Image: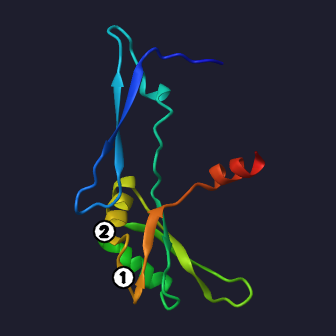
């Protein structure tokens, strides 16, 4: 099935402010008069999830400590730290899930690049497992 929209889509790079180090994009649709574009057809826009990947955690960080760290930015659904199967020791990274994308975005802006328990941590949106499986199959 081939889909033709007959319109131009313009991606505009927004310069990050001092508070945000993450560049973002704005999508502008330049449509012809009389052409209706339904939101369901705009499949190009990447939807960010509400789960965050947190890397470079201190090995002394607990799941409860991770939850307390991220709670000021919204209601945390789940906070988990991955552990080595054989030794049971933390691997130094984990995941935090929120109810909404807005809460996750606030946490990302607030904690990415901060020093927590003596370690510089990085926070980013988690990649979906479905997307990873599709890449592996190609």
* Residue 92 drawn above or below residue 16: below
94 relative position to 29: left or right: right
**Quadrant of the rendering where the C terminus is positioned:** top right
Residue placed under numbered mark 1 in the picture = 115
Q: Quadrant of residue 76?
A: bottom left
Q: Residue at x 35, y 17 (%)?
A: 31
Residue 126: image location, x then y, percent = 52, 60
Visible residue check, residue 54? yes
Q: Residue at x 47, y 28 (%)?
A: 40
Residue placed under numbered mark 2 in the picture = 110
Extreme top residue here?
Answer: 34
Q: Mark 1 to mark 2: distance in Å?
A: 12 Å
Residue 132: image location, x then y, percent = 66, 54
Residue 92: image location, x then y, percent = 55, 81
- Residue nearer the viewer, 86 or 3: 3
- Residue nearer the viewer, 60 or 18: 18
Q: Residue at x 63, y 89 (%)?
A: 89
Element under disc 1 = strand
Q: Residue at x 35, y 12 (%)?
A: 32
72 relative position to 125: left or right: left
- Residue nearer the viewer, 53 or 14: 14
Q: Of label 1 and label 2, which has the lower sequence position? A: 2
| Figure label count | 2
Structural crowding at the residue carrying mark 1, measured as other residues with C-alpha within 10 Å and reported as few (<14), some (14–19) or many (≥20):
few
């Amino acid at each position: 099935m081939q889909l033709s929209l007959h319109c131009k889509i313009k991606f505009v790079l927004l310069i990050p402010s001092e508070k945000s180090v993450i560049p973002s994009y704005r999508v502008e649709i330049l449509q012809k008069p009389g052409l209706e574009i339904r939101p369901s057809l705009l499949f190009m826009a990447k939807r960010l999830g509400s789960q965050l990947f947190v890397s470079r955690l201190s090995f002394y960080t607990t799941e409860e400590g991770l939850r307390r760290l991220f709670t000021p930015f919204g209601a945390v659904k789940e906070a988990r730290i991955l552990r080595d199967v054989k030794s049971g020791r933390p691997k130094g990274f984990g995941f935090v899930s929120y109810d909404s994308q807005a809460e996750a975005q606030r946490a990302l802006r607030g904690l990415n690049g901060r020093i927590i328990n003596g370690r510089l941590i990085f926070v980013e949106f988690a990649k979906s497992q479905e997307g990873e499986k599709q890449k592996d199959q190609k």
